[in-house]
Image: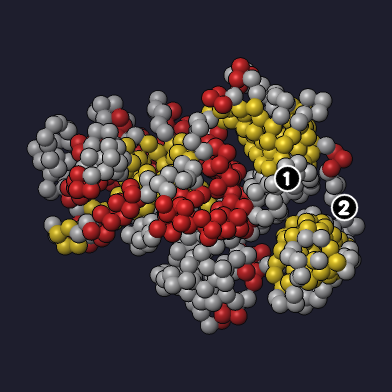
Amino acid sequence: MHRCVKPHCLSISLSIWLLFLLQSSTPLLAQTSTPYIRASRMGITFISSLDHPANDLRYQRALLLGAAWNRWPMYWDRIEVAPNTFDWSGYDRLVSQDIQHGLSINAILLGRPAFHAQGGGIQGLNSATFSDGSDLPAPGKLPNPANAWASFVYAAVMRYKPGGQLASTYGWTAGSGVSVWEAWNEPDLSMFWSAGVEQYARLLKVTYLIVHQADPNAKVMFGGLAYGNPDTDDWLAKVLNIYAADPLRQTFNWYMDQVAVHNYIYARRSGLVVNRIETTLANHGLSRPVWLNESGVPVWDDYPGPVWTANKPSERVYRATMQQQANFWVASTVLSWASGAEVVFYHQLYDDCGNQPGGSNFPPHNGELCSTLAICAGDAFGLYRNERGEACFSLHPLPGSPRPVAGAYYRLAQIFGEVPFANGQIESKDGSTVVSFDRPSTGERILVMWNRTTAALKLDVPALGDEAQLYDISNQDYSLTPTDGKYTIGLQPLTLDNLPGLPAGELSGIAGAPLILVEKINPALLVTNLPLTLTPDASMITPPARPTVDPAQDISPPTTSMTPLPATSPSTFTVSWSGSDDSGIDHYLVWVRVDGVKWQPWLETASTEGQYTGQTGSRYEFAVWAVDLAGNWSLNTDLSPQAETSVK
């Protein structure tokens, strides 16, 4: 635990603070053209899209968090509505709105009209790229009409590039327009591309040649890879092997300027897939910027997620709690940056419809609707919950409000922002991970650290300066001074997430709550690359209880109890609980009921205490469940108070 030494430190969560700022400052934000952080290495998918036209509030919410990039698909079949009949109106509006709000655009060239289909691929794709019957660009050349994909891409780039048709129509400032064109989305998944790797290599080649013919300054991105089965489906390696036989590959930059990759659920994997791309490129003597342009995890403990699965881990596989979602974003992002990623995107601004069909909607419920509805839960990825009136999942009691991950997004933008940082290093030791960066222009080093165990850790971080600021992702910051040449940092234990397929020795796919230390030091020390030496303090590590029964033989449920609370408490107070079991307690689920209304899950944790913040005049009742190492749950599923207090 850390003591807040600034008089303005607050206990309000950062996501709720963002909601307050939105509600209280709308007139100011509407009148000011540049009130936002512009974190040039951070983006959000679907701030707007053809199916989700963004009003000013939607843009404002993305910009308030610090996003600089928007990513959305440009569907060919939504533009060429009949052979040689094009309707650009929807994308004219979309691109214009993004430009108006100062967002850079990662546009995905995707889709095909039925009349241009050929099996799983595109008719005419193997035809020459240019009208002279060649694949060789030259000044003044136009696309080959027989290659419909080349014609569509050329028209899109000419329309939306900086200085293009739309820029001239609306008088955009120099450099405003679409400059990053992604060639399809997740081509290594058959649900997006089913024509095989050779046809994708051809599509990428045609895209590269025609985009650069229309705009020599544009960047063409290898479509974001899912790496669903990297051992057999490494499409980047396969495409590079195809290009290795192309005599013009060097002349035309191996037909790619950048490479994109996606990662969900497992934070550590974000850095690993970035490294894999870099290694694959290096095997061919290449280096390209890598973007992680989709990342995130949906939650189960908030509508439209399956909130009723609190004691049914098998029914919420690949979902996390809201706090874990926030932790994932921070760990995934800094691991990606340290591994070499240039830009990282969160998926997505709102829940929208998730992976469910348009129109999916239902009120909040506790599982009872699953017997009557085909779809009774949705993907709650959003930084914000859906608004009232949306096509899907529009009935949250707090429509449009931010989740904790919104606060985590803002915190990274606030600290990393627009000032360049470099020299990322990752050190994992004794159950902790520390990711460090240098910021030479300000003479600072930045350390992002988290716990990978279920026990509290205390880390000793060698000091290189005389003072540092420590930030959490919930609107708290602390001034630190070193003692005996070190900063002592306490890391809270992680919450188990039940994700399958974890690497050996890993307890969770998602980090414990991260902390960020920013230290002002002598700039000369930034280039010495001093190794971090992080030492856990054994006095803070709670050894696991030794089981008296082998978990494989334990069929008895655990029992739980809570430490009584005083009749009245201050606004923030400590709640404690414990459990008893033959094989040992794995973790707890703590519930709270406010003013006798409805029980809500509060914490899922291996810890035995937590800090709760209430409101003056309200009464709070608590109950706790436990699950043992054998998977048995305590029997007190009919909740009744085990501790209670009022805030005065």
The percent position of residue 96, horizontal first and vertical second, equals: 29, 51
Residue 592's x, y, as percent? 75, 68
Mark seen at residue 545: 2
Q: Earlier in the sequence, mark 2 or mark 1?
A: 1
Q: Say which mark, if any, is on residue 7.
A: 1
The tally of labels here is 2
- The relative height of residue 87 versus residue 391 in the rendered view (above or below) is above
Decide: is 277 above or below 58: above
* Residue 312 coordinates in the image, percent (x, y): 67, 68
User: Which quarter of the image is occupied by the N terminus?
Assistant: top right
Mark 2 or 1, which is nearer the eye?
1
Q: Is residue 127 left or right of residue 261?
A: left
Element under disc 1: loop
* Image location of residue 149, percent across then percent down: 21, 49
Q: Is residue 506 visible?
A: no
Question: Within 10 Å of the Cα at label 2, are there few (<14), some (14-19), or many (20+) other Cα atoms?
Answer: few
Identify which residue is drawn at 29% across, 37% down: 175
Query: Residue at image x 49%, y 43%?
Result: 37
601 sits left or right of 352 in the view: right
Residue 39 visible, this orientation: yes
Q: Amino acid at mark 1?
A: Pro
Quarter of the image with the C terminus is bottom right
Q: Residue at x 14, y 31 (%)?
A: 138
Check disc 1: other Cα within 10 Å, few if <14, some if 14-19, many if 20+: few
Give me the disc on residue 563.
Answer: none
Nearer to the camera, 220 or 442 = 442
User: Label 2 is placed on what type of residue?
Assistant: Ala
For the residue labelled by badge 2, is the local secondary structure a helix, a strand or a loop? Answer: loop
Find the residue positioned furthest to the bottom: 372
Quadrant of residue 119 in the image?
A: bottom left
